[in-house]
Image: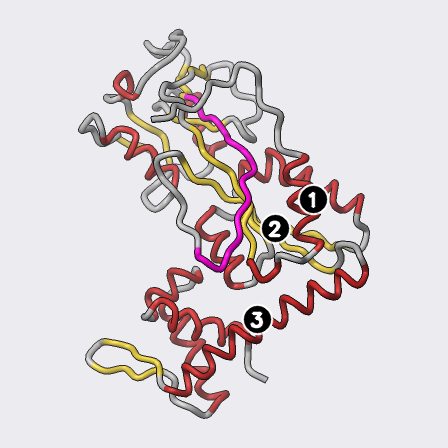
Amino acid sequence: MFDLNRLRALRAVATHGSVTGAAAALGYTPSAISQQIAKLERETGSELLDRQGGKVALTPAAWLLAEATDEVVAVLERTRSHLEEQRDQPTGRLVLAAFPTACRGFAAATLAGLARRHHTLDCRLVESDPNRAVSLVVRGEADLAVVHDWHNTPLTLPASLSVAELGEDIADVALPEGHPLADRDMVTPFDLREERWIGQGPGAMCHEWLVRSFSGLGVEPDIAYQIEEYASQVSLLAAGLGVTILPRLGRGALPPTVRIVPMQPAPSRRLSAVWRSQADRRPAIHATLAALRGHWPTPHPSRPTRDAA
């Protein structure tokens, strides 16, 4: 029997045209992809990659395996769906991937509700940023993921995934107590153009959103403190070290030394659920989608509307 993960690595090389592209799509390093394919070559006794002049091409044997991989994965997905349909209820293991504020905001309650309602469904949770969560679903290591993209920073999804929108999450500017803007009813990017920011580093979606939000002003935000977790950002914020943007989802209680001010245009991120299209018929997928929607936080009446621009 061939190892399915190694077959998926080869399929990714075929799809993306290079080891580097496959690594980016699957969330691995190029070295890890090369190792997987080398092991697959030993398993099959066939040369799979033709490396010449720094370029990589698949051999005829590799194309045969890559095409077979699609059939194998499709058969496995259909079989699992049929098994659940036979029992007429969600069953087996379901792995959900979600980013931290989604875990706090509604994913935990979603899984708890599923566990109470469907005793034969083994729910698991993996905390993961959106880009990695998508890779987990593509690789088959997660069945479904909660992801987000900002209004000016769309998330690119592979064609093999299905997507369902869950809702909009508004973000506000968070300022230290005593900041000159802390008593404002509203602020704009122009008001914040000279601030020192507490935010995520390059490569994170929230970082890209912040940079793009100021690009129209010809300003690059000064991200003095590159902090991944919002809870850590709040600690620096409470110490008066800078300003930040805090989404409302999963925000929790804030220290009394932190002030929240709405921003216009109102920053918002769209939350969606993604899963492999081949698993569309799985009762577990439909039950989880319904539970995610059912536990989505009720919009606050004073929530600012999203600017159409």
Q: Which residue is mark 2?
A: 96
Magenta range is 158-172
Nearest to viewer (mark 3 / mark 1): 3
Asked if the residue under mark 2 is in contact with the one under mark 1, i.e. CB atoms within 8 Å, the reply is: yes
> Compared with residue 216, is residue 91 higher up or lower down, i.e. above or below?
below
Q: Which residue is mark 3?
A: 73
Asked if the residue under mark 2 is in contact with the one under mark 3, i.e. CB atoms within 8 Å, the reply is: no
> Compared with residue 244, is residue 281 higher up or lower down, i.e. above or below?
below
Give the amino acid at mark 1.
Answer: Leu
- Decide whether residue 167 is among the magenta residues: yes
Q: Which mark sits nearer the N-terminus, 1 or 2?
A: 2
Q: Which residue is mark 1?
A: 111
Crowd band around label 2 with a 10 angstrom C-alpha radius: few (<14), some (14–19), many (20+):
many
Q: Nearer the viewer, residue 91 or 20?
A: 91
What predominant SS class does the magenta segment belong to? strand
Quadrant the N terminus occupies: bottom right
Q: Secondary structure at mark 1?
A: helix
What label does residue 148 carry, if any?
A: none
Picture quadrant of residue 14 = bottom left
Q: Which mark sits nearer the N-terminus, 3 or 2?
A: 3
Quadrant the C terminus occupies: top left
Picture quadrant of residue 20 = bottom left
Crowd band around label 1 with a 10 angstrom C-alpha radius: few (<14), some (14–19), many (20+):
many
Give the amino acid at mark 3.
Answer: Val
User: Where residue 41 appears, x then y in whole percent?
Assistant: 44, 86
Would residue 194 appear left or right of 48 to someone viewing this image? left
- Decide whether residue 307 is among the magenta residues: no
Would residue 1 appear left or right of 79 to someone viewing this image? left
Distance from label 3 to label 1 (Cα)?
26 Å
Q: Secondary structure at mark 3?
A: helix
